[in-house]
Amino acid sequence: MDRLTSLAVFGKVVECGGFTAAARRLNMSVTMVATHVQSLEERLGVRLLNRTTRKVSLTETGKFYYDRSAHILADLDEADRAAGALTTTPRGVLKFNSTAAVVRFLLPVMDEFLQLYPSVSLDLSITERMVDMIEDGYDLSILTTPARDTSLIARKLTPWRHILVCSPSYLDAHQPLSALADLAGHDCTRYTYYPYGDDWTFEVDGGKRSQVKVGGSVVTNSAETLRHMAINGRAITLAPSFLVSEDLAEGRLLRLLPEYRGVEFAINAVYPNRNHLPTKVRLFIDLLAERFIEHRVWMS
């Protein structure tokens, strides 16, 4: 039988002074009450209660056991109340990670969240590697490419696409591009975690895909490094739209072959399990989703 239930039944028998009264309080049959107490006694190998036709009383061992078990049950009740409070009032540390490329979008959301929920503290790690959320103890990851672990739950915050870019100075010093195949003859800096490796992939003609294998002098896991090398005229790069939008608007970068659209990806909030998601995590994801709606038009 369930040991905790038997403890609770035993305690109620002691408090009520008998099996019948305890059965009424517990909405349980007298036989079942007696069975729970007997199960405890058989497990311990001792008698806990002296039984007469009119009442029950504690043995010496029973009194010791009741006193200790009453503290245990009280602690469990307190733990239940505390856990219930956590599900309604967010508190504690929310540990999450993100790539550097989206931090500027996260900062205002983090500030707003801390104002709304002052009992929560945020622990943010910036990393370009794919973390092991369970092993590393993260509540949440903000990813710009699909998670490799298919058991994780992903909530889409906004879609986005890559844009083929270079600086005006690069075009001045190199042959212009008129077709996708021309990329094979240029220095192309590449992102380590690009899902298609060296095969840059684009959509044309209503979603039909086209690829070109590229090469170059630099491969890096830092999207910001790719951006700076492109701005400095070092190479062509396939950049996230949200990373270079201001550079395009201000002329530091130029868009190449605009008829070729990068494959659509999404910035996702990724977490280990949707069952019993902590309130602090759920509320943070909800706020992220609300604020990222504002970025969807130009990100995609």
Image: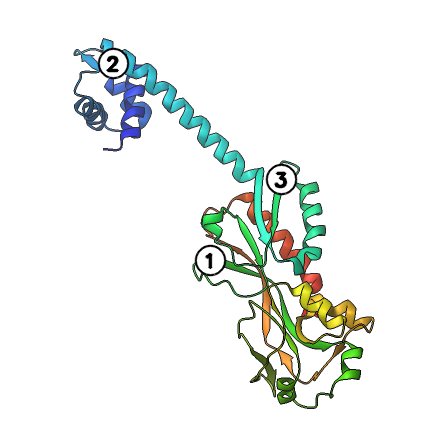
In this picture, is 129 found above or below 110?
below
Query: What amino acid is labelled 1 in the image?
Result: Leu
Residue at 44 percent of width and 32 percent of height: 80
Question: Label 3 belongs to which residue?
Answer: 121
Question: Label 1 belongs to which residue?
Answer: 152
Q: Is residue 196 left or right of residue 122?
A: left
Question: Label 2 belongs to which residue?
Answer: 62
What kind of colouring is applied to the model shown?
Answer: rainbow
Which label's residue is closer to the chain start, 3 or 2?
Answer: 2
Q: Nearer the viewer, residue 240 or 24?
A: 240
Which label's residue is closer to the chain start, 1 or 2?
Answer: 2
> Percent x, y for residue 147?
50, 62
Secondary structure at badge 2 equals helix
Residue found at the far front of this picture: 217
Marks 1/2: CA distance? 49 Å
Residue at 59 percent of width and 73 percent of height: 264
Secondary structure at badge 3 equals strand
Q: Is residue 58 visible?
A: no
Residue at 52 percent of width and 44 percent of height: 278
